[in-house]
Structures are given as structure tokens and as C-alpha cells.
Image: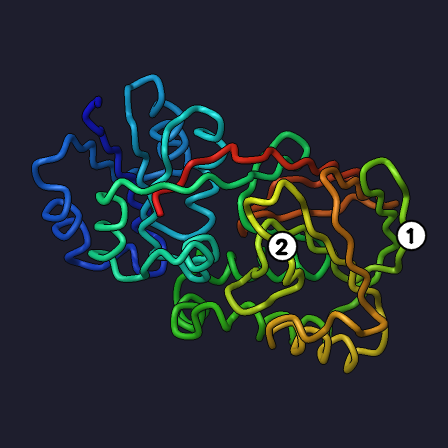
Amino acid sequence: MAARRFRIIVNRSSRRGGKDRLLDILRAEFAGAQVDLCVPQTYEQTVAAAASAAADGITDLVMVGGDGTLNIAVNQIAGTGVKLGIIPTGTANDLATHLGIPLDVRKACRVIKAGGSRRIDVVDCNGKFFATAGGMGVVSSVATGVNRFKASSGYARTIARIFGSLVYVLYSFVLLAFGRDLEQPVEVSCDGRTIGTFPSIALFISNQPTIGKTVMPCPQARPDDGQLAGLVMSGGSRLASILTVVLMSLRGAHRHRRDVQGFDAREIAVRSTERRVFIGDGEVLAHTRTLCFAVHPAALSVCA
């Protein structure tokens, strides 16, 4: 059996990725193994380090960061045979949490070194992949707003770090209470069949139950069932919309409300009259009127 070769990419800007002793812990945990330890200074350097993994003979690409950091790896190694290792140091850590990967750095390292793996699906959104969940409307507005907080300096970044994943829910409450022009019509088709046009304020496409760690729009979603789960949230009163989000945070207690419509399919198409931003794994993946989603079953092997 060929020896494993690890490449560890550290996002020092992630919520816990800048801890003083993090690099020392990683070196100690992987002592004696074949390891390339990379601390990229730019997004482009991170992409390049992930993209060259297969050609460089890397067997395990270990990403230290949040779901956005993992998204870079997902887009570079899905389908290549390189395994993804996760050391979660981000805000929501949705994929790690769902797969049961410890948030403690040392324990996460030991999961990777143990050699176990699990194959999961990835979702194609107009040619870009994501592994967890995503959305448009209020969903994308919340994600991009929180990302601006995390990238800023001063009080906004401090608030985002203090509240952690709860910042996504709090931001959504503010947006639903005071935002303007939230409602936009979208047409949704599943496996080639149009299921309707909806006055949408939010649309979710999910490969696992949670998004933003606490919100559960599609409780039935699983990352290894070869299916996509989706949900459209229609406009109503501001209070009703906030209540729906609260219920989503209570393990999917929103499913019987009149302002939501769920659906499942292998392929989903979403059409809007205006260009809309779609985020997946917390990152902007598209800005267009037509979104086409397809599941790629078991395309990614994850150390778990």
C-alpha cells in the first residue's frame, strides 16, 4: 500500500485559524508523515495549492478553515481520488459538524490520520461545486453580509467572531425586519418538470440538513443519497417570515407552514426575471438569471 502524502493548507483568516500555536500543533500531530504545510497569503495561492494536489502525488488534502475554505478544495479535487481532510476552524463548520468531525484541532488531526473515509455527493451549480448547502435571496444576502463582517476590521469583525454561527440568524432577522425589495418571483423545475413560480424571498438548495450551523431548511437532505433537497420561502408579513426562520432553527419545525414549499430531485433549475446571487458553502458561486443544479453522487472522499 502506497504511503500517504499530506498537503495541509491553513487559512489563517478563519475564525480560529489565527491561533498562535495552531501551526505547532499541526507539525506535532503529523510528525513523521510526508507533509507539505502551506500557509497561503492570498485566495489565488490557496486555489493553486489545492489545484496541484493530484498532480503532485498528494493522497490527502487537509484544509484548515471553514466551509468557504473547504469549497476551494471541493472544486479542485472532486473526482480526482484525492481525499479531503477537514480541520474545522471556521464560523459555521457545517460539513465537519454533519460528518461528526471534532472541532478540536488535535482530535480532528487524529481522525484524518486514522485513515477512515466516507464518500459524499457534490452539487454542481452552473459549473461550480459545493458540498453543504446554499441559497439565494435572503440566504445569499445574509452570507455575503456576514462575510463582509468577517473580512472587515474593528467592531464588525469582533462581533462576528464573538457570536460565531449565531451571527447568521441574527443578520437574517435584521434583514427580514428592515430589508426592502426582498421578494422576487422564481420558477423552479425538478428533473425537467416545472413545479411552479413562487414569490420567493429565499431559496435553499441542500446537500445536508443544515446551513449556518443552526438553520435546517431541508431536514431530509443527506450528502450521500444521490439527491438534492430544496425549499422556497415565499413572502408574507415580516413577522411571519422571522417566525419561519426561527422554526427552521428548531430542527426543521417549519415544514408545515404555508410560506414554504419543499422539493427533491437529481436536477433542479431555477429561473428569475432579475440576476440573482447564489451562494454555496458560504461563497458566491453564481450571479445570473438561470441556475442549474445537478448532483454528482459519491464524487468526493472525505476523511471521517
Q: Residue at image x 35%, y 55%?
A: 88
Q: Secondary structure at mark 2?
A: loop
Q: Position of residue 62 (x, y in %)?
A: 31, 40
In the displayed structure, would residue 26 be above or below residue 19?
above
Which residue extends farthest top? 55
Q: Secondary structure at mark 1?
A: strand
Q: Position of residue 168 (x, y in %)?
A: 55, 67
- Dot 2: within a 10 Å radius of its alpha carbon, few (fewer than 14), some, or many (20 or more) residues? many
| Amino acid of disc 1 | Thr
Residue under pointer 1: 197
- Dot 1: within a 10 Å radius of its alpha carbon, few (fewer than 14), some, or many (20 or more) residues? some
Quarter of the figure with residue 157: bottom left
Residue under pointer 2: 221
In the displayed structure, would residue 255 be above or below residue 143?
below
Relative to 114, 55 lies left or right: right
Q: Position of residue 55 (x, y in %)?
A: 34, 17
Q: CA distance from mark 2 to mark 1?
A: 22 Å
Q: Residue at image x 81%, y 61%?
A: 261
